[in-house]
Amino acid sequence: MKAEQTHYQSCVLCEAMCGLVIQHDGTKILSIKGDKNDPFSQGYICPKAMALKDIYEDDDRIKHPLLKTDRGWQEISWQQAFDKTALAIKQIQAEYGQDAIATYLGNPNVHNTGSMLFVPWLLKALHSKNSYSATSVDQLPHQMLSYFLFGHQLQIPVPDIDRCDFFLMLGANPAASNGSLMSAPNIKKRLAAIKDRGGKIIVIDPRKTETASLASSHHFIQPGSDALLLLAMIQTLYAENLIPINAATKKLAAITLNWEQERDNIKTYVETYTPERVADKTGISADEIKHLTRDFASAQHAVCYGRMGVSTQQFGLLCQYLIMLLNILTGRLDQQGGMMFTRPAANILKAVPKGHFDRYRSRVRQRPEFSGELPVAVMAEEMLVEGSGKIKALINIAGNPVLSTPNGQQMDKALEQLDFMLAIDFYINESNRHANIILPPVSPLERDHYDLVFNLLAVRNTAKFSKALFKKPQNTQHDWQIFLQLAKRLFKGRTWRESASIKLLMMFFLKSGPKLLLDILLRTGPYSHFLGSFFSSKHLSLARLKAQPHGIDLGELSPCLPQALWHEDKTIHLNTAFFMADLQRVDDIFWGSANANSGKTKQKPFLLIGRRHIRSNNSWLHNSLRLVKGRNRCTLHIHPDDALHNGITSGQTVKVTSVSGAIELPAQITNTIKRGVLSIPHGWGHHREGIFLSTASRHAGVSINDISDETALDVLSGNAVLNGIAVSITALKNHEET
Ligand code: SF4
């Protein structure tokens, strides 16, 4: 028997970055527990952590490059796979132009140091305008907000949850997600601490979520109407003279461009959105809105935060803007207990473009790009609609757009008819089944890790380098090696300048990988002065982090403005005219003749929203039996009154129909959902043929995105509308049940 060993590392499965203690014998994992000495998570882990073992041991995980042939998938060498891929891409680009190749980056890329640092080189080699990612079904409004207000798309402030005493949350369920754009392990303990110190947690959501159950109070809201609530709260601030004049608001006024004019503009814009006028539309009474506003304005350390439920709805960007205005007007931005910026030890903001908007547009629907990406809701039509500039091939990197993007059935058809598809992934999922070649990177436990993204969004400044638990097996590749090998082949034959840059990159990084870049980022980061000079042994460096396997604490969040602003004039740009232009659409939808939902969606009796469970992470982890076994979680939440009126009993199969299609799933009758609202979790739907996920296909569920509408967009940002989908329902009789 081999000797038992202990390994420390961060979990890479969600944003919380929990510290793990892994017992192993050199080849097998014996246990995974929380690391009590991790300064950030302090011993906490959630049930998903064990999925790291399941992924590592999964027989379904691909370990060799695969080529699709008439006789099925066939193993080929890495050399063959790289050469065939590069040839196919070059031929398609030569015949149809550079934009004929699209890329889609799935969410796991942001949990992967090598991907974060090296995927830009592959994108640069492809030089295609058809670049897509999961950003536009998630946090695009936050990135656009930060770009416009603070000058950098990733300069995103987070709630200082550990010091606030009034936490107002809209459309967020951190008790299930462990924090989103707010990395916060053991969120339940952090939320309990707010109440223990006499504070309040208020949750606004169409569901009484797991978080709402822990809150001081919860208000059901009509899906898609959060913008009205926020407008009415800001209107109340002005109407009741609740905007404080104190050191915090004076500081923000001093660093906001044209503050007095913008403050007056805001007053004019919100003037007609009184609590009385929006009460019926939101489902929250005028008195409750006024009380909420007064309590928020008078609390000592308050913060307002909105997440998926508000980002992925018809007014996603406007909602995030109004949330930020509420924080700014009441002096909560950059203040203890408010919305604060982090000081990450390795700050990738310098390496990532600040962002740009509307430099070019999508071919079919003329949607503007943001920072080199088009909204993923247009990707399928760019593949299907004939004409010059049509997408002919896709490189799908750790993504599953068939389950994750709107109108998954259309996406499925679009991928099927491509001339060529490459998947860089170690699973054959619902999207990758259409690939011609699959290049599998190593598993998460076979690569080093430093969290470049989520330290940027964490509620405390910490730093930790995790060495790979297991050595990379022979004849396997890291993600970053795959990107560089492909980039090298694609750059071949280009101009001297382009070829030279990739040759230089290969020379430096093909051996060192992300470590060299990471070391440079750490040595040039904000803790250089704190710990010594660049060459000092005390300097925060990779070597220093490696010597601290539990990670190091760099302290609580601290005020960063105006230094953290990226606009050249070092001010906040409120850009009221750009954001408030969306009020016309608000008026049209709520008081005019427009449909309650944008896009092709017609009026239907119910509004459908998504939900998340702590044992799921998008579509990634459904091949872990320990996470999916037991009671079926892919159910339709319906209010008891709605079930009664529609003749639905508990467990009965219900057909849910939208303009995009229909799905059938069992009903779960619950008074935790607002009347007239239905909820289905996302990430399920593993019933399609050809996937190679044995556990997932046994616990298939249905995909909510088979009935979401790809034409329904938050018009201001281009983010997909995944919450507030108009649907009808039919109770199926026994003989119709599936
Ligand atoms: S909360 Fe997230 S980071 Fe922590 S153990 Fe669970 S999946 Fe991993």
Image (cartoon, rainbow, N blue to C red):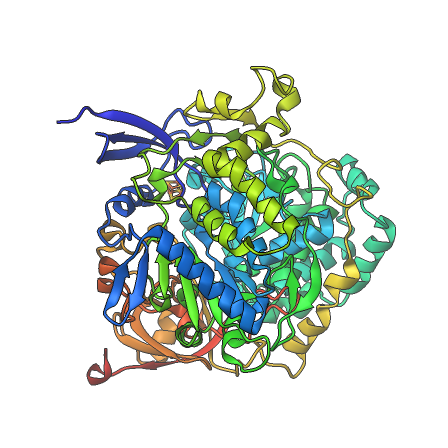
Quadrant in the picture for the C terminus: bottom left
Relative to residue 236, is residue 69 drawn left or right? left
Query: How many marks are shown on the rendered structure?
Result: 0
> Residue 308 appears at what percent x and percent y?
51, 57
Q: Quadrant of residue 599?
A: bottom right
Q: Residue furthest left?
A: 1
Relative to residue 51, is residue 401 drawn left or right? right
Q: Quadrant of residue 505?
A: top right
Question: Which of 583/25 is in front?
Answer: 25
> Residue 731 appears at what percent x and percent y?
31, 81
Residue 440 visible (yes or no): yes
Q: Residue furthest top?
A: 537
Residue 613 visible (yes or no): no
Question: Which of 23/441 is in front?
Answer: 441
Ligand 1 shown in quarter: top left
Relative to residue 72, is residue 368 drawn left or right? right
Quadrant in the picture for the N terminus: top left
Q: Residue at x 55, y 35 (%)?
A: 517
Q: Residue at x 57, y 33 (%)?
A: 346
> Residue 342 appears at what percent x and percent y?
61, 36
Q: Residue at x 83, y 54 (%)?
A: 262
Question: Which of 294/565 is in front?
Answer: 565
> Residue 402 appears at what percent x and percent y?
41, 68
Question: Which of 153/27 is in front?
Answer: 27
Q: Is residue 651 above or below residue 447?
A: below
Q: Residue at x 50, y 75 (%)?
A: 383
Relative to residue 252, is residue 623 drawn left or right? left
